[in-house]
């Protein structure tokens, strides 16, 4: 039975010192320990808010386990990589003074500044691997419409609760690439609150995160190309908000079309039941709270 190779003393020393500085909440020294050769405005600051948040919330390192680095299958590695290329990985378990527990990690790479020393790796963006075609909102609307029509039929067939539906809501995320539909039977139903059937069905929409990551244009419902900025970038907060709005308006148009064509009639809904659309970041929401009950009734006007 073969034994694991010994851990590099420099990696062990790095982790020991990291634990000491973290538990002391000495953020300036911790940053310098991780990246002494980088300016204060550079990559070392990228994890400060997360690490400081844990430390100032009373978390301390409970255990640290070093092992050879194997890149996890995380979604973040679709668009970023760790630099310098790590050779070791430290799993951290942190516990708060209230007994709560969470996990974190440090990726370690040899540091050229001192022989045998290690420093923390950090995330850098990868260049796009391919050109991504424009996202056609008309085609997306047709796909989402088929998904929702099926979800409505499945819900109407499966739920036996005698209470009528009070709300049908769509929630979408361009970060996770997912669209969820929920139904609420609560007579006191309010937008933004929990539903009796949250996330009844989910549609994966991987092209939506692609728009943010690879920056293609959108093709609007009228066939006109929509770009966030002259360079096509959707990555800024302002441009991201416009992307969420384009997608949200497409979903609203799809919901109203389904309603007006009678495809929501399978639901046993109250006369005051409502439709709603929101994104998970809180950028887009329909309707405005003051406008509820006007355009967004689930039951079409006769």
Image: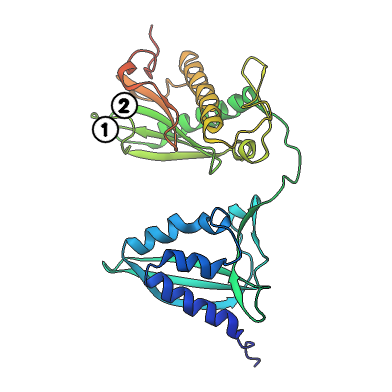
**Which of 300/286 is in front?**
286
Disc 1 crowd, CA 10 A, few/some/many (<14, 14-19, 20+): some
Q: Which residue extends farthest top?
A: 302
Q: Quadrant of residue 152?
A: top left
**Which of 124/72 is in front?**
124
Circles 1 and 2, Cβ within 8 Å, touching? The answer is: yes
Q: Which residue extends farthest right?
A: 130
Q: Quadrant of the N terminus?
A: bottom right
Location of residue 261 in the rendering, given as x and y in whole percent from the top left corner: 50, 14
What residue is at 27 percent from the left and 30 percent from the top?
A: 189
Location of residue 236 in the rendering, given as x and y in whole percent from the top left corner: 56, 36
Disc 2 crowd, CA 10 A, few/some/many (<14, 14-19, 20+): many
Who comes first in sequence, dot 1 or dot 2?
2
Reading the image, the residue beneath label 2 is 166
Question: In this orientation, does residue 121 appear?
Answer: yes
**Which of 186/89 is in front?**
89
Q: Where residue 186 is drawn, which disc sits there?
A: 1
SS for dot 2: strand
Q: CA distance from mark 1 to mark 2?
A: 7 Å
- Left or right: 254 as drawn, with respect to 266: right
Count of marks placed on residues: 2
């Amino acid at each position: 039975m073969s034994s694991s190779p010994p851990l590099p003393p420099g990696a062990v020393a790095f982790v020991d010192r990291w634990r000491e500085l973290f538990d002391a909440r000495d953020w300036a020294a911790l940053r310098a320990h991780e990246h002494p050769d980088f300016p204060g405005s550079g990559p070392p600051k990228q994890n400060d808010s997360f690490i400081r948040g844990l430390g100032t919330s009373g978390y301390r390192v409970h255990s640290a386990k070093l092992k050879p680095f194997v890149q996890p299958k995380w979604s973040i590695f679709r668009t970023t990589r760790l630099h310098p290329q790590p050779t070791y990985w430290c799993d951290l378990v942190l516990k708060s003074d209230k007994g709560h527990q969470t996990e974190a990690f440090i990726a370690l790479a040899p540091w050229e500044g001192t022989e045998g020393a290690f420093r923390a790796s950090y995330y850098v963006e990868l260049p796009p691997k391919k050109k991504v075609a424009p996202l056609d909102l008309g085609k997306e609307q047709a796909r989402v419409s088929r998904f929702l029509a099926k979800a409505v039929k499945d819900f109407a067939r499966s739920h036996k609760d005698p209470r009528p539906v009070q709300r049908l809501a769509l929630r979408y995320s361009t970060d996770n690439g997912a669209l969820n539909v929920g139904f609420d039977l609560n007579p006191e139903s309010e937008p933004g609150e929990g539903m009796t059937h949250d996330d009844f069905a989910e549609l994966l929409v991987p092209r939506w995160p692609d728009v943010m990551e690879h920056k293609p244009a959108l093709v609007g419902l009228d066939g006109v190309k929509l770009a966030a900025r002259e360079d096509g970038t959707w990555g800024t907060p302002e441009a991201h908000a416009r992307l969420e709005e384009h997608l949200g308006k497409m979903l609203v148009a799809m919901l109203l079309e389904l309603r007006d064509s009678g495809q929501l009639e399978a639901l046993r809904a109250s006369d005051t039941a409502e439709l709603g659309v929101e994104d998970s970041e809180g950028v887009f929401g329909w309707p405005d709270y003051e406008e509820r009950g006007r355009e967004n009734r689930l039951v079409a006007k006769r």
